[in-house]
Amino acid sequence: MPGDGAKARAIKEADLDIAIIGAGFSGMYMLHLARDVLHLNARVFEAADGVGGTWYWNRYPGARCDSESWYYSYSFSSELEQEWVWSSRYPAQPEILKYLNHVADRFELRSDMQFNTRIINADFDDHDNTWTLAAESGEQVTTRFVVAATGCLSSRNTPDFKGLDGFDGDWYHTGAWPHEGVDFTGKRVGLIGTGSTGIQATPVIAAEADHLTIFQRTPNFSIPARNAPLSTEEAAEIKANYAEIRAKCKSSDNGFPFEVTERLAKDFSAEERDAIFTELWDLGGFRLLASSFADLTIDESSNESASDFVRAKIRGMVNDPDVAEMLLPTDHPYGTKRPPIDTDYYDAYNRDDVTLVDVRRAPIVEITKTGLRTEDGEYELDALVFATGFDAMTGALLNMNVTGSGGRKLGDAWEAGPRTYLGLQIAGFPNLFTVTGPGSPSVLTNMPVAIEQHVEWIADCIEYLQNNGLTRIEAKDDAQEAWVDHVREVADTTLFPKANSWYVGANVPGKSRVFMPYVGGLTLYREKCNEVAANQYEGFAVSN
Ligand SMILES: Cc1cc2nc3c(=O)[nH]c(=O)nc-3n(C[C@H](O)[C@H](O)[C@H](O)COP(=O)(O)OP(=O)(O)OC[C@H]3O[C@@H](n4cnc5c(N)ncnc54)[C@H](O)[C@@H]3O)c2cc1C
């Protein structure tokens, strides 16, 4: 400090203006804006050896988007959306990965991306207002800003089953599927998990394997996707109406261009409700949830009518009444867990070579040399598939061992669950931004819409700092506390917290139970973010 006799340490120039961690939808767009619009010295660090994020890692059989192709895509370039051709309503993983590779080439992103680089440490220096990132390889880099584009669903959750190491067969996690694929022909396969991923994988693995045994803890409400190729006429119509489709997504609460309804279930008779559900069931996908009744995720009786409707459909699709009964979800309201959509999921249970095992009634005890043992019996298996999801929303951030201002550890700050201001920053961790962080609408949306909103907000924020000669931005504690309270209060007005979902961290043993995404809707959320920016970044401390 001047005057105290100590020698002032000179401010060091950082290697980078901005380090972006992750090369999925978020990191790629962030690089484009940071480098090509703001002209910053920017670099992406990615653990994988290519771009794509979710769509790089999740190559399991049946992996497919649940958002329709034409709006599960970037909206920032009309040339891009006009030139790209989607083959079907719900594209499979290889097609989305191809799209993201095309984006990387088209915007020449690769030259500023460093692959095979996992960041394992991030330390903030209060003196220089810079971050030092350390990679697994030992490489270090300093940067003024960090954008964690590390993904909400990128940190795999593999349950710690006794005996897995001694299993003689092969085992796979759907979120790290071998690039060369897996041939299950002639194999007895066990699949653990019946969330969105397990539901997509089941019919495809069933068709290939000698026998598929599905170990189910929680039955889910799955709606048929009704996937189909996109005809040239349909594609042309979408392209002609892109401006309208994007505007609808952006002004919606969930990033989907669906018709919004004000209808309340209680105002309709049981027959009328059934007719509405049937029409939306026939259209397929998320429409039943999004467009049937406005109070579906708020009002128990409204939800029960939808839940009953889906349960009746499941009974109608599964031939064996005992198996159908096991597949009926009864422990959570429809839509309060990530709603799966499927192609022929329930049909798979009508095959002779598919067995459903209820591991809530008789839990898994251990993986044996030759298979899997539950409290009820032993299953001989040649291969095991873990469709057990992710340490959602916080896993990838906590894995980076982040140390903020004054030596504060992110792990300590989030011990009782994640706390953020707007899901964009964390008090005590200056100059670190999170894309679709906890406390933002994120996983409750068609994510490219939420991602673009965040990336654009972050870019505008950095531009503001640059223009005003500011070098440091940090969420204030009181603003963060108020936002955390608001996120919780809004969630508590809904049925969401009732479910043991990954939204509340229930799938990871020991994780604090907090409803992590913001359920107040993208529209309100966007307005709040815009207002904060318009008021000179209200709720943030900015300085140089
Ligand atoms: C199977 C599956 C299906 C999905 N389907 C849909 C859907 O239908 N609709 C929808 O809206 N969303 C869907 N999602 C959510 C999907 O994750 C988002 O839509 C979107 O792809 C997220 O992009 P992202 O760039 O934010 O994160 P990601 O795509 O997850 O990318 C994050 C990247 O960061 C990298 N990374 C993480 N930590 C580090 C580190 N420490 N060092 C270096 N690199 C790191 C990871 O390797 C990864 O490549 C799905 C997710 C999954 C898993």
Image (tube, grey):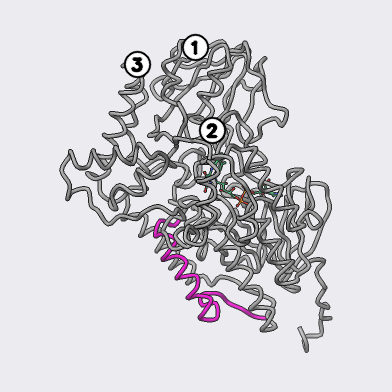
Q: Is residue 211 above or below residue 173?
A: above
The residue identified by callout 3 is: 319
Q: Can you say which quadrant of the picture contains the N terminus?
A: bottom right
Residue name at image x 22 percent, y 44 percent = 301
Residue name at image x 26 percent, y 34 percent = 308
Evaluate if marks 3 and 1 touch, with contact meaning CB atoms under 8 Å apart: no
Give the class, few, some or many, for how many residues have Cα within 10 Å of label 1's Cα (few <14, many ≥20): some
Location of residue 473 by image quarter: bottom right
Evaluate if marks 1 and 2 touch, with contact meaning CB atoms under 8 Å apart: no
Label 3, label 1: how far apart the Cα atoms are: 14 Å
Residue name at image x 82 percent, y 73 percent = 12
Q: What amino acid is at disc 3? A: Asn
Front of the two marks 3 and 2:
3
Q: Is residue 379 above or below residue 140?
A: above
Q: What amino acid is at disc 2? A: Thr
- Residue interval drawn in magenta: 518-544
Q: Percent position (x, y) of residue 422?
A: 50, 64
Label 3, label 2: how far apart the Cα atoms are: 27 Å
**What label sits on residue 544 in the rendered view?**
none
Front of the two marks 1 and 2:
1
The residue identified by callout 2 is: 388
Sequence-wise first label, 3 or 1: 3
Label 2 SS: loop
Q: Can you say which quadrant of the picture contains the C terminus?
A: bottom right
Q: Is residue 169 left or right of residue 196?
A: right
**What label sits on residue 353 in the rendered view?**
1
Sequence-wise first label, 1 or 2: 1
Q: Decide if ligand 1 comes within 8 Å of the CB at mark 3.
A: no
Q: Decide if ligand 1 comes within 8 Å of the CB at mark 1.
A: no
Q: Is residue 518 left or right of residue 7?
A: left
Question: Closer to the camera, 84 or 131?
Answer: 84
Direction front: furthest residue: 233
